[in-house]
Image: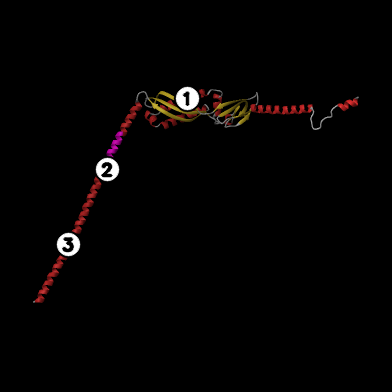
């Protein structure tokens, strides 16, 4: 009976795995896939890549900031990357793109007491310079860009008023580039202490409510017209003097030429007269000889 049962059981197929073996392989493959997915998610969670237009500030661990000393954070900039320890560290991004700042000052007194209205546009950004970026991180990390613009605007307006008090309205209106350069020079130190950087500053308009600049322009136009008329008059006078001098020289040349012609003509006439006199003398002598011979 036992031999009969043994003979009825199917023999194992060669080249095929059993169900238990298939389950073991499937479990191994699933574990590997899950592990890879887990590692990928973990690495994406732990690795932070910094874009070129931002700074990455990782808090939770001390780092040596060079001349700034040790800080409770580290900074990654210029497209770098770093590992962030889960739970122990936190990574925050700080935008360093340009921020347009509109600067408007009304009734700011210039040198001489004339109130002026100035409108300018500046481009400001968070500095990535290792010497100053910590100032920006400690003041503006996590703050809205509008707050940065407001701080930069207040500093620019204050320095603009300070520089304006040293210049006359004529200097401000006629040399706006120098005016903007002086403002940028004075405000640069203040912004660097805040961790900000001034890229450009352009003076768009200069005006006043007492019509002083317009009167200056009218006087300047009148002066330019007067100078042009004087220059034209002087040029005409100079041209007339030159023409008179040239005419005088031409008359002298014509007189000299006529004198030479007369002298030459007189010389020719004198020579002709002498030749005729010699001819007459010879003819007379010949006649006398002939007369003597005939006698």
75 in the magenta segment: no
Kind of element beneath mark 3: helix
Q: Is residue 11 toward the left or the right of residue 37 in the image?
A: right
**Which quadrant is home to the C terminus?**
bottom left
- Label 2 Cα neighbours within 10 Å, binned few <14 / some 14-19 / many ≥20: few
Residue lying at 17% horizontally and 62% vertically, measured from the top left:
270
Any part of residue 71 in sight: no
Give the residue at the far right of this rendering. 1
Find the distance from the CA under tag 3 to the CA under tag 2. Answer: 46 Å
**Which quadrant is home to the N terminus?**
top right
- Label 1 Cα neighbours within 10 Å, binned few <14 / some 14-19 / many ≥20: many
Position of residue 152 measured from the top left corner of the image (x, y, whole percent)? 49, 25
Position of residue 4 measured from the top left corner of the image (x, y, whole percent)? 89, 26
Kind of element beneath mark 2: helix
Q: Is residue 46 toward the left or the right of residue 145 in the image?
A: right
Question: Of callouts 1 and 2, which one flags the residue occurring earlier in the amino acid sequence?
Answer: 1
Find the distance from the CA under tag 3 to the CA under tag 1. Answer: 103 Å
Find the distance from the CA under tag 1 to the CA under tag 2. Answer: 59 Å
Which is nearer the eye, 189 or 122? 122
The quadrant holding residue 25 is top right
Which residue is under mark 3?
Answer: 270
Give the label, 1 or 2, closer to the camera.
2
Which is nearer the eye, 132 or 211? 211
Residue lying at 74% horizontally and 27% vertically, measured from the top left:
26
Question: Of callouts 3 and 1, which one flags the residue occurring earlier in the amino acid sequence?
Answer: 1
Which residue is under mark 1?
Answer: 153
Magenta segment: 225-239
Which residue is under mark 2?
Answer: 239
Position of residue 143 measured from the top left corner of the image (x, y, whole percent)? 54, 23
């Amino acid at each position: 009976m036992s031999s009969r049962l043994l003979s009825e059981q199917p023999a194992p197929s060669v080249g095929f795995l059993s169900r238990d073996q298939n389950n073991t392989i499937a479990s191994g493959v699933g574990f590997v896939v899950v592990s890879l997915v887990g590692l990928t998610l973990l690495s994406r969670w732990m690795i932070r890549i910094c874009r070129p237009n931002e700074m990455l500030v990782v808090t939770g661990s001390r780092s040596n900031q060079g001349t700034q000393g040790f800080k409770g954070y580290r900074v990654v900039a210029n497209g770098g990357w770093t590992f962030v320890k889960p739970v122990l560290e936190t990574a925050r991004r700080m935008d360093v793109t340009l921020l347009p700042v509109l600067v408007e000052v009304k009734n700011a007194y210039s040198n001489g007491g004339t109130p002026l209205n100035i409108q300018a546009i500046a481009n400001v950004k968070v500095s990535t310079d290792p010497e100053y970026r910590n100032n920006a991180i400690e003041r503006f990390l996590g703050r809205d860009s509008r707050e940065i613009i407001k701080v930069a605007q207040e500093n620019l307006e204050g320095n603009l008023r300070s520089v304006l008090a040293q210049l006359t309205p004529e200097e401000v209106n006629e040399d706006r580039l120098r005016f903007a350069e002086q403002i940028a020079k004075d405000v640069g130190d203040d912004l660097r202490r805040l961790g900000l950087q001034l890229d450009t500053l352009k003076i768009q308009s200069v005006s006043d409510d007492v019509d002083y600049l317009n009167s200056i322009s009218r006087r300047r136009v009148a002066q330019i017209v007067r100078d042009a008329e004087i220059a034209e008059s002087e040029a005409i006078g100079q041209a007339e003097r030159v023409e008179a001098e040239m005419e005088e020289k031409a008359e002298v040349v014509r007189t000299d030429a006529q004198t030479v012609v007369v002298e030459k003509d007189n010389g020719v006439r004198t020579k002709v007269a002498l030749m005729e006199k010699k001819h007459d003398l010879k003819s007379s002598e010949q006649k006398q000889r002939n007369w003597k011979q005939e006698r």
